[in-house]
């Protein structure tokens, strides 16, 4: 087997060398011989035949969100506005690197931080700080298995793989309808049976609490229930505390495993402690909790891929066994996590002054998003809209779930160069004082005389 692979590797190298040695200045004796003894047409024919195994590969569908972002970049309309991608922008429409993050990076540079590999499970001190941030200062970390992950996406993938290995075949994971688009693919890839539960009612533009409770109650015992810890994506509609308590009661009765996805702690309300209320309640109730945690939004570390996956265990012995299996999931998947982003978070949360500064900066982001939320509704009224937009005001977090249907969203893009997802979601981070009136006018023009509710 080894000799066959080695032969194929050598063949690919020689073919590449023949076709590219002039360009790259490669002058090996083998490439000179091949170049002098075989016409280029023969090489092209050989290369074409070598890649025949790729002939059956079909063109994949573009990502729904990232594809829109690419279309926005290509658009030459001077009016264009991007309210699609969920990344924070300041009041001038530019990305904002938090000053506390910059200060942490300077501190890291000044202290001579190196670029060594992290362990499979990541930076232990970072994980400790991250879990304390999520579960609270009094969390029983001694029985929480936690690993560093590639942001929230990686956390969901590790968690899904772990569940796929240790839960009975056919176990269902219940995911809200709607949800972040990647949830479905991630858990299907992990081998879980994905089912949707009612979450948001387009008929009322609000939480479908009765449908939610009924669906998780009627699910098979010991299912996995995915819950957004705060600032539900895409709706921005979170359950009130009395509904959270009912969800917890049902999960306890049914023996469900609760899988929280937390991407917006601190970013949702501006108060990280408040945004962790639901997670900590379930933890205090003694329910089996898993948590996918991301620092992309709340620390602005989008490209650093910084997060954690944690599993609450019964005791320390159980934690050690779970940790050993999480490492076995991670090792063949990506070996070990990146260093820089986790070092930033660890540095900020280890420094009392930087921590206080960070909390203020996070509140600044949340406050600006909140201002754009109210301003959008005000501008809609000024434009003459008679719709009830109170649902937008009541939502929380980065997004406004407007109630516009797919056709309306297409009009927003085609007629006004306003790029958004086709479910009616608007990223409020893309709005500022220079474009919010234009966006509101476009929404009014498209929705005037039409319903923003559907059955």
Image (tube, rainbow, N blue to C red):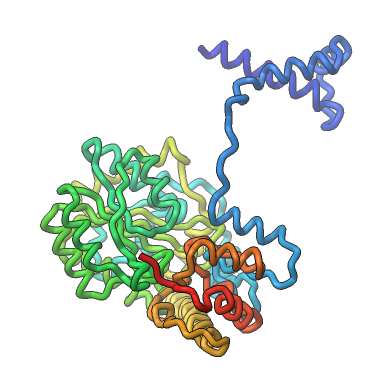
Q: Residue at x 46, y 72 (%)?
A: 402
Q: Residue at x 83, y 16 (%)?
A: 41
Residue 408: % across, % down: 54, 66
Residue 115: % across, % down: 56, 51
Determine the image quadrant of residue 152: bottom left
Residue 440: % across, % down: 57, 80
Q: Nearer the viewer, residue 423 or 168?
A: 423
Q: Nearer the viewer, residue 190 or 455?
A: 455
Q: Is residue 241 left or right of residue 447?
A: left
Q: Residue at x 47, y 57 (%)?
A: 306
Determine the image quadrant of residue 241: bottom left
Residue lying furthest front? 449
Q: Quadrant of the C terminus?
A: bottom left
Above or below for 164 versus 403: above
- Count every numbered label the image shows and give the total: 0
Residue 229: % across, % down: 33, 65
Q: Is residue 349 left or right of residue 72?
A: left
Q: Is residue 270 left or right of residue 287?
A: right
Above or below for 189 versus 455: above
Question: Is residue 341 at least partly visible in the picture?
Answer: yes
Q: Nearer the viewer, residue 323 or 353?
A: 323
């Amino acid at each position: 087997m080894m000799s066959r692979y080695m032969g194929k590797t050598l063949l690919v190298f020689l073919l590449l060398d023949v076709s590219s040695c002039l360009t790259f200045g490669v002058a090996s004796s083998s490439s000179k011989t091949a170049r002098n003894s075989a016409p280029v047409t023969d090489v092209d024919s050989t290369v074409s035949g070598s890649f025949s195994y790729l002939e059956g590969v079909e063109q994949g569908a573009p990502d729904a969100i990232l594809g829109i972002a690419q279309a926005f970049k290509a658009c030459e309309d001077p009016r264009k506005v991007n309210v699609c991608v969920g990344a924070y922008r300041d009041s001038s429409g530019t990305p904002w690197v938090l000053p506390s993050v910059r200060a942490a990076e300077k501190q890291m540079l000044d202290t001579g931080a190196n670029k060594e590999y992290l362990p499979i499970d990541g930076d232990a001190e970072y994980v400790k700080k991250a879990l304390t941030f999520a579960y609270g200062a009094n969390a029983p970390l001694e029985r929480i298995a936690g690993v560093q992950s590639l942001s929230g996406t990686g956390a969901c993938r590790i968690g899904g793989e772990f569940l796929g290995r240790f839960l009975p075949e056919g176990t269902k994971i219940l995911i809200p309808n709607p949800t972040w688009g990647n949830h479905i693919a991630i858990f299907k890839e992990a081998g879980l049976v994905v089912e949707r539960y009612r979450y948001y009612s387009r008929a009322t533009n609000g939480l479908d609490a009765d449908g939610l409770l009924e669906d998780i109650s009627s699910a098979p015992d010991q299912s996995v229930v995915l819950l957004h810890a705060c600032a539900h994506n895409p709706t921005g509609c979170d359950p009130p505390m009395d509904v959270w308590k009912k969800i917890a009661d049902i999960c306890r009765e049914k023996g469900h495993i609760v899988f929280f996805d937390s991407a917006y702690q601190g970013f949702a309300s501006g108060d990280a402690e408040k945004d962790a209320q639901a997670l900590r309640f379930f933890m205090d109730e003694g329910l089996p909790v898993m948590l996918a945690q991301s620092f992309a939004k709340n620390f602005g570390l989008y490209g650093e891929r910084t997060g954690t996956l944690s599993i609450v265990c019964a005791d320390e012995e159980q934690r050690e066994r779970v940790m050993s299996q999480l490492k076995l999931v991670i090792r063949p998947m990506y070996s070990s996590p990146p260093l820089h982003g986790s070092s930033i978070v660890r540095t900020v949360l280890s420094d009392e002054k930087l921590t206080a500064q960070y909390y203020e900066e996070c509140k600044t982001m949340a406050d600006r998003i909140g201002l754009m939320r109210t301003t959008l509704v005000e501008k809609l009224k000024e434009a003459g809209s008679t719709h009830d937009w109170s649902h937008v005001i009541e939502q929380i977090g980065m997004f406004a779930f407007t109630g516009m249907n797919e056709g309306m969203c297409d009009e927003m893009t085609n007629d006004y160069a306003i790029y958004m997802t086709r479910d009616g979601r608007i990223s409020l981070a893309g709005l500022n004082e220079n474009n919010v009136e234009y966006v509101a006018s476009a929404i009014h023009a498209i929705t005037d005389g039409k319903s923003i509710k559907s059955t």
